[in-house]
Image: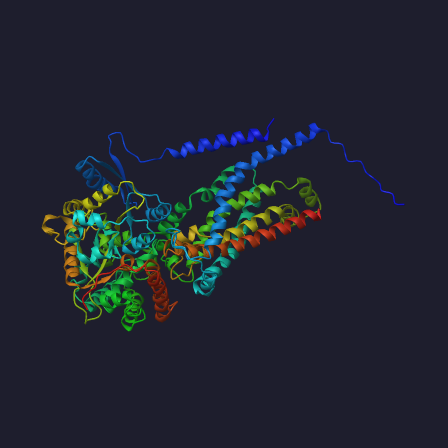
Amino acid sequence: MITWKTVASATAAAAMLALAACAGNGTAADGGGRQDLEFWFWGAGPAQQEVMNEVLVKGYNESQDKYTLSVNFNNAVDKNIQVALSSNKGPDIVYGSGPSFSAQYAASNKLADMTPYAEQYGWEDRLLAPMYESGTVDGKLYSLPNSLINIGVFYNKTVLADLGAEVPTTFDELTAVMDQAAAAGLYPSVTGNKGWKPVNQNYISMFLTHEAGGHAVYEALQGTAKWTDPRIVDAVNASADFYKAGYLGGDDYANLNFVESMQLLAQGKSPFFIGPTLAFQFASDFFNEEAGNVEDLGFMPFPNVNGDLASPSFTLGSTASLSINAASENKDGAAEVIDYMMSEDFAKEMNKSWPGYWAVPLKDFNLDENEYEGLSKEFVKAIKETSTGVADGNFGFFAGTFLPPATASALTDIDGVWLGTVTTEEFLTKVQATFDGELAKGLVPPVPEPTK
Amino acid sequence: MSTTTVTAAPVVRPGRRRAKRDRTLTNYLLIAPALLLSVIVVVIPGIMTAVLSFTDWSGASFDNINFRGAQNFVEIFADPIFATSLKNNLIWLALFLTLPVIIGLATAWLLLRRGRMRTVYQVIFLMPYVLAPVVNAMVWLSIIYNPNGGVVGALGLPGPLSSLSGALYAAAAVDMWHYWGFLTIVYFGALRQTPMEHVEAATVDGANAWQIFTNVYLPSIRSTLMLMFVMIVIFSFLAFDYIWLLTQGGPAHSSEVMGTYAYAFAFGSFQFGKAAAVGLIMSAFGLVASIVYTVMSRRQLSQR
């Protein structure tokens, strides 16, 4: 017979069992006395995971005996990290999309202040000033960009030769070759946002750099100019004209992603793939020794549309950012891993077999492309050029890295202007309103000032 | 002089009272786990969502959270993208209330008249429904709708997912393809419950197949039809996965639905308060559908 006394005892017993089950998850330390460090990364392909495990995990673990690093690969890493950080859990080393991501979480006290580690390891002296500063919030360091990217033009030398064209050096030459390609039944260029709408941010950022100029965007980010500034209006209109002419993936912009675009470029279906340097990591599947076309791939910065701007100029960004979880019990270890990843040796090893993702933004990166082979050679050359451009101040900003999150999302809607569903004025008015809200909340990360 | 009639209270023996109390206690204990789970997983987050929809919560932490009143709702209702997404949800609803229902009923009817291989057909029809949405979406995205090397490309047609006017319908086609098999199985099960005497009587009276279907089978599965209609209405306002996997609401928000609209606020812009507000609006539509169903069911029961 069940009585209330029985119910009370059973409830108490169940509660004690539940508490005992939850209590066990304290600091994880393995049998060898090492502390565990966790790093969550996106779902890179098997070959790339192998490189990371070899160079980062094995390399770091064998270099010291205090910590054991493990990397967890998952395509939903950004959502997982958002949820984990919100509940004060998650990995020790936090992988993010850039300063805009880290500013948000730093403001919510989810990321550790890395300034003491920066002083300890000398990061400020080691890294390119603009990239280092972008990870600070109110003078304190909360993230470091893991890699430099630029947005430019991949080209297939064989296709250009077949078209009887030289590698273009100006915007007019670029569009002329694309017209030739279209007349020959090829795609003028290949690229697309299939599966990831924020790819749009690459192209609006590119036109903001090469038509409005990086300084115009810098002024808008400081609030000293409006997003409806005529220079920015011209950039938006130039991107729309470019899209409508079929220069961004022809009619298939929404039907292609970067991997397919690289494949089409390798197959000779287009002379150009317009995209970020991180796309080098997709190139090796299609440009390789087996296909005998490794030497076919080249990369050039996107040419200026506005002839008054300094040339060449670069759309600066980072593939990701590295931060330390404020809830981590091994912050020192996490800082050690980040330091390990911000080194020339690490960059060199990773770039040998995984070009595109690991252009560590080092000041004195002794990059000699002759030390590399194949695609890595072309990638290192591209990054060297970008680094020089950054040092000279000839750069603009990739929205996904440097703009606050809602403003970057608002810029993703550029395809409305391209497709004629909204006017340039409506689009930029919305961007302005969104930006004003984030500026008021202090979510705009510090950005380096380009040359005027 | 007034008289009062006193009615003696019914005599309940103490033993029976205790047994009744124990049975009630047992009943509560048996439903306690499910109730607890519902409260923790559904009710509490539901109340939190409703509360957060009036704030500017960024989703990162609760430290810096401000009450905004109805401002989130004002901004959402003034946003043309919300109007587009609501319109698309209504289109989605119209599509799902017609095409998969008609196909499901037709194939269930054909299965009913089929003697052999019925189970094999049911398994084949149900396959798209049991496959993960990601798998289905990848098949359609990479093989069928791909203008480079896919079926669409082989036929020389433009990719439908890049069309401003066609992207929503292309995504809906994939979801309908995934869903109609489930309706077939549900309707088939319901059709088999129809008393054969009614069917035989109609046949003897000279009714043809169409007359038997509309006058005997359909009325007998009315409650199943009603239930599936309500489920379709609710799920149409919650539509998300196929649209997100295939178009992410693009191109240029032309295939945006309230689910993808809310998701973009939450995970693209760190505006969880607004995402919660959109979620609340979506749920309101589902709630209306549930109330209508409940009223109709009660009316139907009271008529019996």
**Which sits in the foreground, B194 or B55?**
B55
Q: Quadrant of residue A232?
A: bottom left
Quadrant occupied by the N terminus of chain A: top right
Q: Residue at x 38, y 68 (%)?
A: A422
* Residue B174, visible in the rendered structure: yes
* Residue A156, visible in the rendered structure: no
**Which sits in the foreground, A307 or B164?**
A307
Residue that sits furthest to the top in the current view: A1
**Which sits in the foreground, B227 or A13?**
A13
Along the horizontal axis of the image, is B203 left or right of A368? right
**Which sits in the foreground, B32 or B68?**
B68
Figure colour scheme: rainbow
Residue that sits furthest to the bottom in the current view: A230
Placement of B50 over or under A27, stated as above or below: below
Query: Percent from the top left, x then y, of residue A118?
Result: 20, 49
Query: Percent from the top left, x then y, of residue A10?
Result: 52, 30
In this figure, what is the number of numbered marks?
0
Query: Percent from the top left, x then y, of residue B149?
Result: 32, 52
Placement of A120 over or under B94, stated as above or below: above
Quadrant occupied by the C terminus of chain A: bottom left
Query: Percent from the top left, x then y, of residue A412?
Result: 34, 60
Residue that sits furthest to the right in the current view: B1
